[in-house]
Image (cartoon, helix red, strand yellow):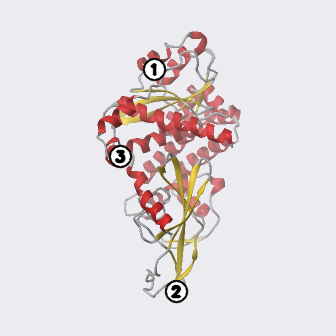
Amino acid sequence: MEQFDFITNLLGIKDPNITILDVIDAGTHKDVLAKLEYQAPKCHNCQAQMAKYDFQKASKIPYLECAGYKTLIRLSKRRFRCPNCGKMAVAETSLIKKNHQIPVILNQKVSMTTIAENLAVSTSPVIRKLKEFQFKTDLTWLPENMSWDEYSFKKGKMSFITQDFDSLKVVAILDGRTQATIRNLFLRYPRSVRNRVKIITMDMFSPYYDIAKKLFPSAKIVLDRFHIVQHMSRAMNRLRVQIMNQFDRKSHQYRALKRYWKLILQDSLKLSDKRFYRPTFRMHLTNQEIVTKLLSYSQELRQHYELYQLLLFHFQEKQADQFFRLIEETISNANPVFQTVLKTFLKDRDKVINALELPYSNAMLEATNNIIKVIKRNAFGFRNFENFKTRIFIAINIKREKTNRVLSRC
């Protein structure tokens, strides 16, 4: 028992209600089996005395490295049940916040200053260690399938990132997204290397189109399907707002269009058929019945809603011919808000068709951008772009390579 108390002190677990049961060597990491238990509290619902019930399935909590090994705490939490009202409760601990999987100490170990404080050193050796990572650009290789996108480095300033679609390896990160910046990056690669790029996925940022065609003459440009649907839904929402503002702010029509705006943007085939009481209408209605009532307020809203749903259907079914035939037939009579979006689709017809026919998108790069946002938020922002760039490469490229090596040994 004293040995497990020593492990608790070694890991820095200060909650006396956590008891270490065993430590298992899993090869690539250490599994620490533990339980969280204390006296039953009062019920938060009726204030009656609760009773001990059972233990939850063990939570997998990643923890700080110990003796060079990654550590995973498998924590079983005691559950409590109220004999009066039947409510259940789960034991809580200062080690980890309620409904979270990441411990508090791990969230704090993100900025260089915090790392230095935890390791009892100054920030200088931490910065020197960070600068030891040198990521050299291989000018003899580019991925066949490449993804382009932008991310926010500073407020109001967007920067450029490109990633290998297949291996998810970040190829380059730039402090800006202008055509000159992107051109200077890729002109360093020989033309023979650039000709090997076959697919480039991107969002609907038009300045990327011309520079991609000039630098990669053999590549097809594939627009991200999410952004195409987003253009249609935004046009539908702007039209809804226009029609809503034609009514008096205190009218029933205004309040209904304002409250149930999400139902108008939703795919009509996915509307729920469950009936609930709706305070706005003072009756029990399904989502489909609510949409029918909303469309009855305006003929223009009804016409464009039907157009929006047809475009959405043809796009989801990957029917490119029907999709563009519908656009050509309706564009002249459409609202100016819709006309702008439809003209964009006609102008970029070949790229939209590629999005429908080819199985590529920017989904994986958007996930990488989310990791970048977490890095920036946890470090409370970066002033030095090179440090920011290095942290991204460490978090994505190096971590992924280590994970792949571990998986290959299993």
- What residue is pinned by disc 2? 85
Which quadrant would residue 156 be assigned to in this image? Answer: top left
What amino acid is at disc 3?
A: Leu
Residue 119 is labelled as 3
Residue 202 shows up from this direction:
yes
Foreground of the two, 332 or 97: 97
Q: Residue at x 41, y 22 (%)?
A: 178
Check the image and report above or below for 322 versus 10: above
Residue 222: image x %, image y %? 60, 29
Looking at the image, tell me whether mark 3 or mark 1 is earlier in sequence order: 3
Instruction: From the viewer's perspective, tell me whether residue 258 is left or right of residue 331.
Output: left
Which quadrant would residue 247 be assigned to in this image? Answer: bottom left
Find the distance from the CA under tag 3 to the CA under tag 1.
Answer: 39 Å
What amino acid is at disc 1?
A: Ile
Q: Are marks 2 and 3 in contact (CB under 8 Å)?
A: no
Q: Residue at x 46, y 45 (%)?
A: 238
Depth-wise, is mark 1 or mark 2 nearer the camera? 2
Q: Residue at x 50, y 20 (%)?
A: 137
What amino acid is at disc 2?
A: Cys
Q: Residues within 10 Å of mark 3 (few under 14, many from 20)?
A: few
Residue 246 shows up from this direction:
no
- What residue is pinned by disc 1? 182
